[in-house]
Amino acid sequence: MKFPPKIPAAVGATYTRTLLIVLLNLPLVWGCLLWDLRGVDVTALTAAYATAVLAGWYVLPLLVLLGVVFLLLLPVRRAAAPATALIAAVYVYYLLLDAVAYGVIRIHIDFFWLEYLVRDFAGLGLPDSSVVTAAAALAVILLVEFGILRLSGRLRPPRRLAPVVWAAAVLAMTASQILHIVAYQRNDSRVTVLTPHLPFYVPFTSHRNADKYGDLLPFAMDENAAVLEESTASLTYPLAPLTFDPAAAPSPPNLVVILLESWRFDAMDADVTPNIHRLSLESSVFTQNLSTGNQTTAGIFGIFYGLHPTYWAAVKANSARIDNPVLVDALTERGYACALYARSKFGRHKIQDTMFRGIELHEDFAGKNVPEMDVDLTEGFLGFLREQAARGGPFFGLAFYKSSHYDYCYPPEYEIDKPAKNINMAFMNADTDPAPYLNDYRNAVRYTDMMVGRVLDELRALDLLDKTIVIVTTDHGEAFNDDRANFWGHGTNYTKYEVQVPLIIRFPDRAPAVYAHRTSLADIAPTLLTRYFGCTSDPRDYANGRDLFDAAAPPRAHVISSYVNHAFVFGDDVHEILPLSTRKYRFDDAKAAGGDPPPGLLRSVMEEINRFYR
């Protein structure tokens, strides 16, 4: 048998015709995508990258899909070309609708919005005429596809069209992602600016390969070469310059933020976190607080920007122009000494470049294991506090502990909750008893609480506690098969186990109290700016969050992000938007079906997730 086997001429001709249909559709596909890119500042590098993305990311998956369809239709080869034309029509129609929607409301139509466009367009505030326009556009596209189908049967393409098309698509995909990997690492906005403009575009990143191979690229790629002009930026943040009343905040307090990695809402009590619990008795405690993410970057983004995490890609694309969130700007402009102590790779994950640019970062600590490194982190942070007490000026310090991250680490003497067993994901299922794994996690949290206690004791000993706002919270929660749906860890769903998190804030001027209304990590920044830094601007100019203490505020949708997807939490219902589908379930049970959102909240969240786009 010869290899590769010879393909029958009739089969080859039919497949070549399907490729012709794809090629004839590319002007329509690229026209819609270029419409999304209007307003982008075009440089030579931007144009080269955009060309590679359009020829690779938006063509190669289509070739794969149509290749599968062709193989399935081999027994009825005549159906292959019409099926290809129909799929192409759907593809072009989606891109057209998305381009129109993005141009008007800066939202890409994922499956969540597509469902409500089909089922309840009036609930989104769209006029009846939009349905007529959409139907007319579909009719035109179908007519064009019929013409392309007819034309493809008359053309005589080159014999080697298939390998040339596939090679070009693979080469374009590879080139575009190599460019993005290096540009993302170096904050080159000429490349990264395109990401939020394009639908379903989640480009690759690789810190290791960017550092290893980035210098091999034959052109300059650096941050100084690529700061976007204000007129061509995709994001307007803040919406207007902020105004401050110095008389309203003559002596802003110090700020200490302590984060326990993966800290869930029910792991804050006198048993697991005795030191933090003692702090809570003299603090404002928010018992129904939601993170803005079920993974680290989205959660921290919400704390410091006060924005919905769906803006994360746009902030990264515009980071060289934005510089830092307005809360951090308020600190640095007032002469705060700032330092970060974190073991969560703030540099690698772009947290430093987008939130703490120019601030001293400590992320390498001595120790043979995670618990020892967290001890060294604590020693460094205590040293920073002592330096600031001696200096006498205002300061901001962040300590981010890692021991409570999977695979939960602590010294043997902290194995108090027993039996304690470390998770092996390969052997987990919905019937697995979570108790020993939850015990393991609780032991790690208890160990971290010991170090937090040392920080709190040092603040008291240095007479800094009553001059400092102390925030103790986390980036996200952690699941342990709580609803017997086989979800473990984080980044897997948006139930309360991964999203509802402790928030304890000791304000020097507020009496301790417990607040049971629903709040968000996105509320921290606007609360601090308005109450403690004299910001007189409308919080809507710089945040989606609102005042933490506004218990009478109307209900709102909470926007929460993961690695490549996001969700809307409407009351007790979660709408999770996946790349190719949506899921609806209850906030306290991933196995229970969720309900539909109120139309008012639907319109509100639409406005909020696009308000800062230009």
Image: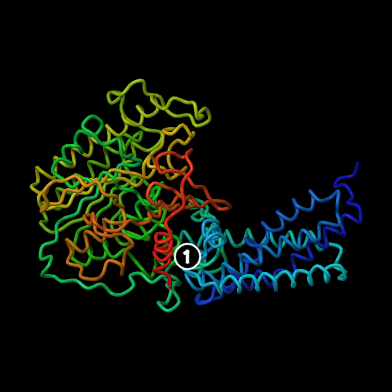
Q: Name the foreground residue: 332 vs 565.
A: 565
Residue 566, horizontal then vertical, whole percent? 46, 53
Left or right of 433? Residue 274 is left
Left or right of 404? Residue 9 is right
Residue 45 appearing in the image: no
Residue behind mark 1: 124
**Image quarter (top left, top right, bottom left or bottom right) of the C terminus:** bottom left
Q: Residue furthest bottom?
A: 231
Q: The residue under label 1 is which amino acid type?
A: Leu
Q: Name the foreground residue: 152 vs 125.
A: 125
Residue 36, horizontal then vertical, whole percent? 55, 71
Left or right of 384? Residue 247 is left
Residue 551, horizontal then vertical, whole percent? 23, 54
How many numbered circles does the render carry?
Answer: 1
Measuring 34% from the left and 47% from the top, which residue is drawn there? Answer: 475
Residue 363, horizontal then vertical, whole percent? 33, 47
Q: Residues within 10 Å of mark 1 (few under 14, many from 20)?
A: some
**Image quarter (top left, top right, bottom left or bottom right) of the N terminus:** top right
Q: Residue furthest top?
A: 419
Please name the colour scheme applied to the rendered image: rainbow
Residue 523 appearing in the image: yes
Left or right of 534? Residue 133 is right
Instruction: Determine whether 526 is above or below 497 in the image.
Output: below
Instruction: Determine whether 545 is above or below 479 in the image.
Output: below
Question: Under tag 1, what secondary structure?
Answer: helix
Instruction: Determine whether 276 is above or below 48 in the image.
Output: above
